[in-house]
Image: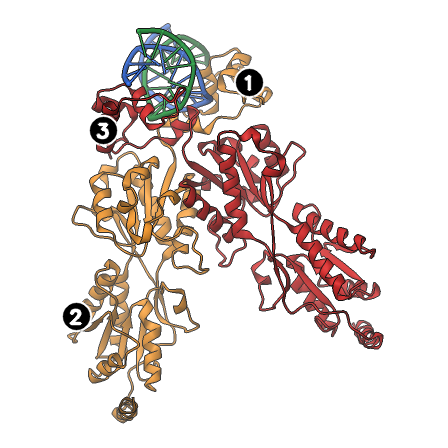
Chain colours: A red, B orange, C blue, D green
DNA sequence: CTGAAAGCGCTTACAG
DNA sequence: CTGAAAGCGCTTACAG
């Protein structure tokens, strides 16, 4: 196997110095150094002839750019499950990369061991073969974020992430705004007892939804009734909703279907007895059902594409000019009017009946 | 921004040479060089103190390998269609890359314009930023193959490819052997009039299937009856099968379902009147049905994984020792006994009846 | 306009 | 057992 050609090889063939070869390749020298037309021609021909392509590793070590953007996925790059949650993010990244003419380096060598993240599997250093890096994954890894920020390595997270260590650049979904709007609509329909069901507020995206919910209910002078990490398989949740007189619930994506199932088991009708709003795309494939959910979709492709563009902006000439608002993107979610929301049940009697049935079932159990 | 510590920093602190630091870190020196206990201790402490972590970029440059393997996909890297045909190949590549500790560079910048291939979008040049490259795609691109071979660039195709320009390294499916075996089984069941339905023999994989079919029928002294690129939506195909007295057909993956549909429309029963063997995984997602096809599966993940391993072998110490057999892999297909094959219809009357019905329908049309 | 030289942070013969 | 030195393939001041 022929050794790959180097600038030295090209230089020898073109009868110029290696510096000159580098110069014609990356014209961005101190003073936009011009190489005379004749010499440039010779060099270009020699490049052609030798099949030279710059070694990105050497380029990076010397402090240059490679037009290679890293992609670090906390989950598998090529997900096993068709219809995987992460797929659309990567499609967006790919599309934007193609548009920008950059290549994507998937850090398969850094496969996150047992979900312990980047820091655990070799650290941020390895990412530096790329000009910058996009990160995607379900969880938050505070150490990774701190490390990334401290090292001053250009990166963008897909999905909002916070760190005490500094301003984390991200392309996130506007969950707060979308949730708020969804709750506003429930209120406009006449609902007064609206619950929020979310997963752990450890995660930024859940905090955002909760915040949107709180803003909307408090502005309307309603009571905020939220359940964090409820167990949708227990009857207690439905008991609690009933006791609180809830007529509508906004639910984290993976909680919507279980809530619906639990409610139906109680012989509630959806949306007759309970309206449910789904706050985004479900992550777990088993949650993908045929239900026409009212709520909104997570703009996954857009998040991927915008993340890449944001990274490119950071790599551009004057990254200092980027403000926090430039670095932290909240992309609008896509509202969808489905079949799981209706005005609250009109008659108290109906509600009584339902409650009676429910109570009977509960006693039997 | 704290500059990250280097071996030089550690060396200074530990009062040893930078070489020694490198030595204690990577004990694999020429003669397993031992550093005395005391010195090793000092170095380790200094590493601790400085928080030193090796710069992988420098390691790669010094090591002579970038550990970057390119992946060029003629189709989109992250396919839009869930259940995409190409997905499993990439999963296999990813798994093998993870095992080998190499990263994958997806050439998104080279997105093949209108299916015109590599040569059309700039040529082999950019691929050279990687140590070698895996190529995946539906079609054959003779120019690309010739270019790759002529340039002596290490690559492996997923799926068998031929070129007059030389020996193309590939990890292909053993379609010939699998098809032959399938036909043998039909013969063992008592079939004597067996047809082959394949797509254009322009493609290597179709030629392989045809070859396997021909070998099997000729060995059994039967007539070879093959249809290349038949139109399964026309009644002519069924007419022809009927005229030839066919009782079983082996069909290219994307032709099996259309053939079945056409036969059912004729009121043939499957497998009663016609046995159908499907020769691999269908490419087009609309062909994915609930039918339990008899035939075999394409070992897609294995092909991806083996392609990467083969490429790595080419990049290893003594690639010259690789023979053509080493470079061209035919991975065994996975046989599957489904519900679309049975012994041929026992009675001539049954067949007459069927033919009569069919003839009537044909006249009506 | 062009080239000699230093430097990026490592590994690895080659000498002591 | 340890270190001085060369080299991996680039970029980028710094001199001509």
- The chain to which mark 2 is attached is B
- Residue at the image point whose x is 44% and y is 72% from the top: B290
Labels 1 and 3 share a subunit = no
- The chain to which mark 1 is attached is B
Spot occupied by residue A102 in the image (x, y as percentages of width and height): 41, 40
* Count of numbered tags: 3
Measured along the vertical axis of the image, is residue A304 above or below residue B295? above
Q: Can residue A230 be seen in this view?
A: no
- Residue at the image point whose x is 35% and y is 84% from the top: B265
Q: Quadrant of residue A157?
A: top right
Spot occupied by residue B231 in the image (x, y as percentages of width and height): 27, 74
Spot occupied by residue B287 in the image (x, y as percentages of width and height): 39, 69
Secondary structure, mark 3, is: helix
Q: Name the residue under label 3.
A: A46
Rounded to the nearest whole Å, what is the CA distance between mark 1 and mark 2? 73 Å
Q: Mark 1 points at which residue?
A: B41
Measured along the vertical axis of the image, is residue B5 above or below residue B333? above
Of badges 3 and 2, nearer the viewer stands 3
Q: Name the residue under label 2.
A: B219
């Amino acid at each position: 196997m022929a050794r790959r050609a180097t600038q030295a090889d090209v230089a020898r063939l073109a009868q110029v110095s290696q510096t000159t070869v580098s110069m014609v390749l990356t014209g961005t020298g101190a003073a936009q150094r011009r190489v005379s037309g004749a010499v440039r021609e010779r060099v270009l021909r020699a490049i052609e002839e030798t099949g030279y392509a710059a070694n990105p590793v050497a380029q990076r070590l010397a402090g240059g750019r490679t037009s290679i953007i890293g992609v670090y996925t906390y989950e598998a790059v090529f997900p096993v499950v068709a219809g995987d949650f992460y797929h659309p993010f990567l499609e967006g990244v790919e599309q934007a990369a193609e548009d920008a003419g950059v290549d994507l380096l998937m850090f398969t060598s850094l496969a996150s061991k047992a979900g312990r993240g980047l820091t655990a599997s070799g650290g941020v250093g390895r990412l530096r073969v790329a000009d910058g890096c996009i990160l995607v994954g379900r969880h938050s890894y505070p150490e990774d974020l701190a490390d990334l920020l401290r090292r001053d390595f250009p990166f963008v997270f897909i999905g909002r992430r916070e760190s005490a260590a500094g301003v984390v650049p991200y392309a996130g979904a506007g969950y707060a705004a979308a949730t708020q709007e969804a709750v506003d609509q429930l209120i406009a329909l006449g609902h007064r007892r609206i619950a929020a069901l979310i997963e752990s507020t450890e995660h930024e995206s859940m905090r955002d939804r909760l915040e949107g919910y709180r803003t909307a209910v408090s502005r309307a002078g309603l009571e905020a009734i939220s359940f964090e990490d409820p167990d949708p398989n227990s009857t207690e949740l439905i008991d609690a909703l009933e006791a609180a007189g809830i007529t509508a619930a906004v639910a984290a994506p993976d909680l919507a279907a279980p809530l619906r199932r639990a409610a139906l088991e109680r012989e509630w009708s959806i949306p007759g007895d309970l309206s449910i709003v789904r706050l985004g795309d479900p992550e777990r494939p088993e949650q993908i059902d045929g239900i026409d959910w009212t709520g909104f979709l997570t703009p996954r492709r857009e998040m991927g594409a915008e993340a890449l563009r944001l990274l490119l902006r950071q790599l551009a000439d004057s990254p200092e000019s980027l403000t926090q608002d430039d670095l932290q993107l909240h992309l609008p979610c896509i509202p969808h009017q489905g079949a799981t929301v209706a005005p609250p049940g009109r008659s108290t009697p109906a509600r009584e009946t339902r409650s009676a049935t429910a109570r009977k079932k509960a006693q039997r159990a």
